[in-house]
Image (tube, grey):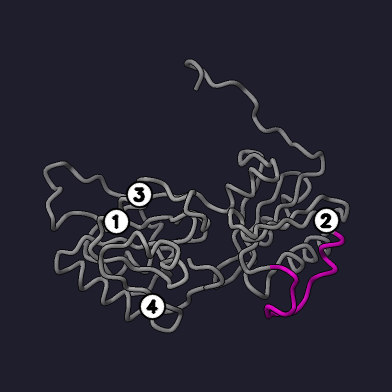
Amino acid sequence: MGPGIVTDAPPTDDRPPESVAAAAPEPPVAAAERTEAAEPVHAVGIGPGNPEYLTPRAERAIREADAVAGFETVVDHVRGRIKGEVFACGYDDQTDRLAAFADRVADGAAGTAVLMGDPNVSGYQFLGRVEGVVDRPVRVVPGISAIQVAASRARTPLEAATFVTLHKRGDLAADRERLRAAVGDRHLLVLPRPYDLMPGDIAADLCDAGASESLTALVYERLTHDDEAVTPTTLGDLATRAGGDGPDDTPFSDLSVLVIRAADGSTDAGGSEPTGGDG
C-alpha cells in the first residue's frame, strides 16, 4: 500500500481483497511448469523508501519485469530500476490501471507489482487486488518493513511485541481491542491510519481504556529517509495530541510508526541461544 493511501475500490469477487490474498498458501510451482505462461507475477516489497533497504531479490524482480504496477508514490521510489512498462495508479484509477497491467500479463509479459515495505505488513489489500485480476499465480517477495526498523530503533523484539495495522479500511474494532488487551504487558508496534487514527488518537483510546499514562511512547517518522525523526514521549502526553482528521490536525507525518513500550521496559524476549552452531 502506498504512503498515505488506503484503498477501498471493489474487488473482482465478493470477498474483500485482503481475504483474496490470504485465502490459501502459495501453491508450489514444479520445475516442469516454469514455462513463460506459468511464470508467476511477483508482488515485491520495496522497503521503507531508502534504496539501501531494497533487497537484491526484489531489485531483480523489478528489473526483469516487462510490466510493473503499483501506486505512483511507491513506483517513484524504484522508477530508476524499472526497464519495463509502468502501470502507476492512484486511488481513483487503480481498477483501470490494474486491468491494463493484467492484460499485459495475459499477453505474456513478466509482471511485477510493487508495494511499500513488506507486502505482509499492511499490504494485503493491494496484493489481493493484483491477485484478483491476473491470470497467473502471485508470488510474494518479502521486503523490509518500517515496522521492523521501528522495532530495532525502539529495541522492542518482535517476539515480545504485538503488531497491529490500522492503515486500512473497514471495521477496526477487533484491531483496537487487541491493542487495549496488550498495552502495558507487551510492546506495541502500530501503523496509524492517516489522518483519523494518528498516534495521538491511538494513545487517547488506550488511556481511556485504562492504560498507564506513564508508558513510554515513541513516534517514528519517515524511517530510513534522510529526514527521519523520532518523538519520545509518554502515552499520556501523546494522548493530548488527539483529534482531527486532516494533515493540519496532527504534528506527525502520514509515514509514522507508533511504538509503546511494555511497562517493565523489556518483557520476556525469549533469550535462548540458537542450537546447531553460531546461527
Give the mark nearer the N terminus: 4 vs 3: 3
Residue beneath the point at 83% across and 50% down: 215
Mark 3 or 1, closer to the camera: 1
Q: Residue 63: give its label.
A: 1
Please state which amino acid type lies under the numbered disc 2: Thr
Boundaries of the magenta span: 236-252
Q: CA distance from mark 2 to mark 1?
A: 42 Å
**Residue placed under numbered mark 4 in the picture:** 94
Q: CA distance from mark 3 to mark 1?
A: 26 Å
Q: CA distance from mark 4 to mark 2?
A: 38 Å
Q: CA distance from mark 2 to mark 3?
A: 41 Å
Q: Residue 219: within the magenta? A: no
Say which quarter of the image contains residue 16: bottom left
Q: In the shown orientation, is residue 131 left or right of residue 267?
A: left
Q: Residue 233: give its label.
A: 2
Neighbours of disc 3 within 10 Å: few (<14), some (14-19), many (20+): few
**Residue placed under numbered mark 3 in the picture:** 25
Q: Is residue 94 above or below residue 58?
A: below
Expressed as whole percent of the image width and height from the top left, the position of residue 127 reads 39, 63
Please state which amino acid type lies under the numbered disc 3: Pro
Cβ atoms under marks 2 and 1 closer than 8 Å:
no
Q: CA distance from mark 1 to mark 4?
A: 22 Å
Please state which amino acid type lies under the numbered disc 4: Gln
Neighbours of disc 1 within 10 Å: few (<14), some (14-19), many (20+): some
Q: Is residue 184 above or below residue 172?
A: above
Neighbours of disc 4 within 10 Å: few (<14), some (14-19), many (20+): many
